[in-house]
Image: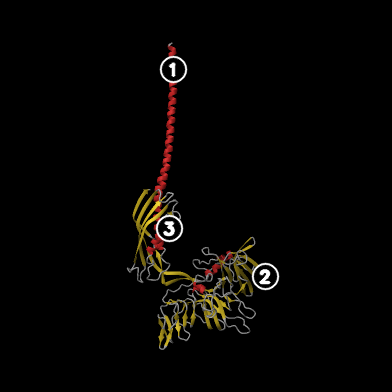
């Protein structure tokens, strides 16, 4: 009996243990479920916290702060952007009322409606990826100005060299990141501060092609000789002085006149010097007419040292100088030039004669790669036209003739056709300006590494001149030494009038409407003269003693003595439609000489790779602002929920 009780007790104890384990398991499961529920609640609340605080509260703050930065930069850009490229001497760079104008523009842009941060359109204030918006609700901007010499900015002295500008500003910006502006959390920031800069004045300079002058004379010492009387068109300048003589015709300048000398010369038998535009000696008065004014005592204009840039332009279509200045070496030429007669590469040891072009050949296809035609040795050159767009160069060297036709309208990229030695070579493409910083344009540099012993257009059977330069042909012919012009060189379409009665109401050297087809010719030598040797055939049995050259003529170099000089028979009428640029004045031996300035040269238009210079103006200065310094003096933050 006792034994049975013991067994029953053991059975009861085992069942109790099983119940305890089940209870513990249940409790653990309840705890786990509670923890999971709590984690879910925390996660949801965290999302709400991120959305409500980080995205709304902080987003609104960032929106307002970005608005302040954008508006401040807008002010700075507006102020510094109001400084013109050049200003007259003794003139403040910033126009009066700049601060008020910039403030008005800012309020119109940012005050009327909320502005998304992204796409605010203000340079220098690139927005981050925040999708918020801002609105500038209040703004002020007041500027002050002082000069380095103490003179007032409203009437600065001629000695002033810099202007110091300071601008005090306040900006209030409301930012919000909610879906609807005005609902939800927002942040309002107010910033007070100032920004400023120093505008330093320097003489204004500009790169100018020499074709921009109707007449330029480098060496013209005062009282060394008088200018030929008549009407002189186009801007004129000399690094020397202009000297005038007595006579019945007088002098009329239609465009600005300048000189490095502070005086004019007046030749009355004995020469007087004066800065005045007229002078009198006894009963004689010399009174040139300056229809566009004059400016004496200007800085001398720097001159080109050589024609190396023109030679290099043939090779690469760019023509940028190298340091130190140097002509292309035989090795450089051999890499890109091929002989027009047969296509052999330029000899690595150099060549004394021959016509060469820059092109490559791949799988039998020739492709033009440079900017023109390179001639070794002396050559006679005849210019003519072919069809509506073809420009023809007939190059003769000791009886060996090469004919090159450049036509930009044939084929997808134009075609250059070369006839030499009884063989015709077709080259895809045409000479071009290939500077990657400039738009590609059809331009031809014909460089002669020697002298051009004869340059002319063609004539019909009666001796009348035919067009030498086709429409849309842009050509410069340059030589190492002399260039001799032996006959008329005329544009197919005249761009300007050559007489006061040619077109009613226009006068002389006026642009003819509809006649600008980008046709242009430049003739340049840095190492010789432009010689005139009129050798044209008779017209109707009568000798042709007139000569017309359409283009800008330049015989110019630093320290050079080149000029335009007549080496042949006397010329009755010499007409130049363009301009004449020379180191010195030489004997032209022409009864009448007229230079009709090509008004297209008044802009940036010029013959390709024509020599250029940097001109310093005494009538204008450039104001360069220092980096803008920003100082924030006060900052307030208000964040609200509504």
Coloration mode: secondary structure
Q: Residue at x 60, y 80 (%)?
A: 536
- Residue under label 3: 124
Residue 528 is left or right of residue 537, and the answer is: left
- Residue most extreme to the top: 1
The answer to the question of whether label 3 and label 1 lie on touching residues, with beta carbons closer than 8 A, is no
The Cα–Cα distance between marks 1 and 2, rounded to whole angstroms, is 128 Å
| Total count of labels | 3
Q: Is residue 27 above or below residue 641?
A: above
Q: Of label 1 and label 2, which has the lower sequence position?
A: 1
Q: Is residue 343 above or below residue 222?
A: above
The Cα–Cα distance between marks 3 and 1, rounded to whole angstroms, is 89 Å
Q: Of label 3 and label 1, which has the lower sequence position?
A: 1
Residue nearest the observer in this picture, 592 or 111: 111
- Residue 320 can be seen, yes or no: yes
Residue 233 is left or right of residue 152, and the answer is: right
Q: Which mark is residue 422?
A: 2
Residue 497 is left or right of residue 75, and the answer is: right
- Residue under label 1: 10
Q: Of label 3 and label 2, which has the lower sequence position?
A: 3
Q: Which mark is residue 292?
A: none
Q: Quadrant of residue 37?
A: top left
Badge 1 density bin: few <14, some 14–19, many ≥20, Cα 10 Å:
few
- Residue 343 can be seen, yes or no: no
The Cα–Cα distance between marks 3 and 2, rounded to whole angstroms, is 63 Å
Q: Residue at x 35, y 50 (%)?
A: 638
Badge 2 density bin: few <14, some 14–19, many ≥20, Cα 10 Å:
few
Q: Secondary structure at mark 3?
A: loop
Q: Residue at x 57, y 80 (%)?
A: 547
Residue nearest the observer in this picture, 21 or 522: 21
Q: Is residue 169 above or below residue 470?
A: above
Q: Secondary structure at mark 2?
A: loop
């Amino acid at each position: 009996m006792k034994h049975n009780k013991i067994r029953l007790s053991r059975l009861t104890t085992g069942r109790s243990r099983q119940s305890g384990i089940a209870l513990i398991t249940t409790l653990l499961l309840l705890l786990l479920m509670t923890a999971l529920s709590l984690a879910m609640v925390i996660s949801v609340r965290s999302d709400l916290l991120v959305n409500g605080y980080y995205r709304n509260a902080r987003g609104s703050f960032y929106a307002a702060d970005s608005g302040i930065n954008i508006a401040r930069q807008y002010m700075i850009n507006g102020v510094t952007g109001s400084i013109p490229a050049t200003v007259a001497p003794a003139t403040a760079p910033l126009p009066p009322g700049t601060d008020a104008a910039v403030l008005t523009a800012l309020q119109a842009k940012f005050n009327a409606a909320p502005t998304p941060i992204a796409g605010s359109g203000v340079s220098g204030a690139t927005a981050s990826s925040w999708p918020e918006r801002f609105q500038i609700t209040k703004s002020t901007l007041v500027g002050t100005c002082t000069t380095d010499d103490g003179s007032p900015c409203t009437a600065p002295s001629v000695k002033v060299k810099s202007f110091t500008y300071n601008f005090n500003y306040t900006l209030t910006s409301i930012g919000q990141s909610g879906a609807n502006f005005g609902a939800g959390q927002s942040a309002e920031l107010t910033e007070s501060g100032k920004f400023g800069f120093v505008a330093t004045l320097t003489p204004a300079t500009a790169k100018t092609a020499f074709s921009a002058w109707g007449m330029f004379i480098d060496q013209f010492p005062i009282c060394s000789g008088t200018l030929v009387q008549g009407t002189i068109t186009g801007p004129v300048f000399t690094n020397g002085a202009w000297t005038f003589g007595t006579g019945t015709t007088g002098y009329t300048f239609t465009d600005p006149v300048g000189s490095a000398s502070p005086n004019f010369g007046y030749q009355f038998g004995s020469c007087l010097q004066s800065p005045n535009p007229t002078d009198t000696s006894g009963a004689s008065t010399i009174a040139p007419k300056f229809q566009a004014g004059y400016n004496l005592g200007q800085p001398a204009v720097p001159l080109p040292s050589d024609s190396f840039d023109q030679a290099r332009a043939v090779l690469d279509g760019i023509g940028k100088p190298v340091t130190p200045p140097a002509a292309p070496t035989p090795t450089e030429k051999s890499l890109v030039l091929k002989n027009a007669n047969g296509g052999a590469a330029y000899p690595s040891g150099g060549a004394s004669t021959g016509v060469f072009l820059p092109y490559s050949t791949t799988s039998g296809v020739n492709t033009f790669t440079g900017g023109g035609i390179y001639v070794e040795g002396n050559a006679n050159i005849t210019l003519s036209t072919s069809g509506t767009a073809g420009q023809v160069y007939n190059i003769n060297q000791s009886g060996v003739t090469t004919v090159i036709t450049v036509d930009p309208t044939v084929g997808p990229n134009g075609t250059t056709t070369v006839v030499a030695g009884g063989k015709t070579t077709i080259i895809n493409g045409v000479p071009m300006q290939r500077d990657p910083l400039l738009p590609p344009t059809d331009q031809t540099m014909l460089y002669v590494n020697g002298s051009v012993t004869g340059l002319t257009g063609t004539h019909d059977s009666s001796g009348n001149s035919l067009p030498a330069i086709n429409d849309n042909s842009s050509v410069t012919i340059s030589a190492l030494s002399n260039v001799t012009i032996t006959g008329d060189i005329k544009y197919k379409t005249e761009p300007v009038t050559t007489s006061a009665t040619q077109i009613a109401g226009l006068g002389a050297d006026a642009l003819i409407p509809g006649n600008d087809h980008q046709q242009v010719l430049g003739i340049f030598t840095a190492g010789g003269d432009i010689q005139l040797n009129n050798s044209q055939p008779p017209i109707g049995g009568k000798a042709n003693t007139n000569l017309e050259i359409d283009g800008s003529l330049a015989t110019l170099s630093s320290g050079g003595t080149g000029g335009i000089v007549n080496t042949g028979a006397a010329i009755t009428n010499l007409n130049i439609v363009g301009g004449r640029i020379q180191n010195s004045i030489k004997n032209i031996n022409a009864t009448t000489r007229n230079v009709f300035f090509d008004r297209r040269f008044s802009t940036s238009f010029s013959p390709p790779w024509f020599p250029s210079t940097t001109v310093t103006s005494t009538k204008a200065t450039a104001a360069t602002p220092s980096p803008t310094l920003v100082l924030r003096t006060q900052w307030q933050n208000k964040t609200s929920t509504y």
